[in-house]
């Protein structure tokens, strides 16, 4: 979740910077690449502006994804998206639980997401409506 919701939320809801997990993985993945396409860095002034700069964040949760560790991950100069660095394979193949419109029903997904919110951003209130 650090490479998904956390990518945007951590700088805004925490300290104005990306999570240490995300920065470490990105640095490891791209250390041998001649042209780094990694995370941008924030100045101290930018961190102060970004940090805790919102009153609330609205989340429209619909479904979950199947995420598996990519054991044979190898960085590539062709990686274009930051999510390529997450070292995971992502699937939304929950067909057995899909509703009539094809949206997969993954009720435990929101529970896991809320646990992530609590563990990473415990200083913020969560309202479910």
Image (spheres, rainbow, N blue to C red):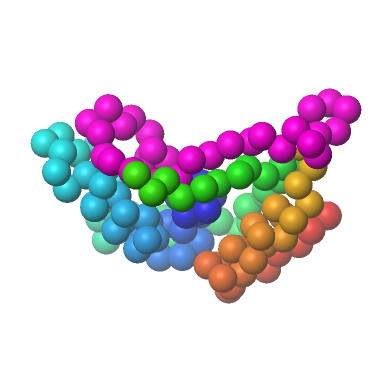
Q: Residue at x 70, y 53 (%)?
A: 109
- Magenta segment, which residues? 73-102
Question: How far from the left and from the top, in percent, is residue 14?
Answer: 46, 65
Please tell me in which quadrant of the rendered image residue 24 appears: bottom left
Q: Kindly tell me whether residue 45 is visible in this rendering.
A: no
Q: Residue at x 46, y 50 (%)?
A: 69
Instruction: Give the residue drawn at x 64%, y 57%.
Output: 113
How many marks the image carries: the answer is 0
Looking at the image, the residue that sits furthest to the right is: 100
Residue 53 point in image, percent of width and height: 50, 57
Whether 21 is drawn above or below 90: the answer is below
Out of 120 and 32, give the one closest to the viewer.
32
On screen, residue 19 versus residue 32, left or right, reads right
Q: Does the image show residue 115?
A: yes
Q: Position of residue 67 (x, y in %)?
A: 55, 46
Residue sitting at 31 percent across and 32 percent down?
79
């Amino acid at each position: 979740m650090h490479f998904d919701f956390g990518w945007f939320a951590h700088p805004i809801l925490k300290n104005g910077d990306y999570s240490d997990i995300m920065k470490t993985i990105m640095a490891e993945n791209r250390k041998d690449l001649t042209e780094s396409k990694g995370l941008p860095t924030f100045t101290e002034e930018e961190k102060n502006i970004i940090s805790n700069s919102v009153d609330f964040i609205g989340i429209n949760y619909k479904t979950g994804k199947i995420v598996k560790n990519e054991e044979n991950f190898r960085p590539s100069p062709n990686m274009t998206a930051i999510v390529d660095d997450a070292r995971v394979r992502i699937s939304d193949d929950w067909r057995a639980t899909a509703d009539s419109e094809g949206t997969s029903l993954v009720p435990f997904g929101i529970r896991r997401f809320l646990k992530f919110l609590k563990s990473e951003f415990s200083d913020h209130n969560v309202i479910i409506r």
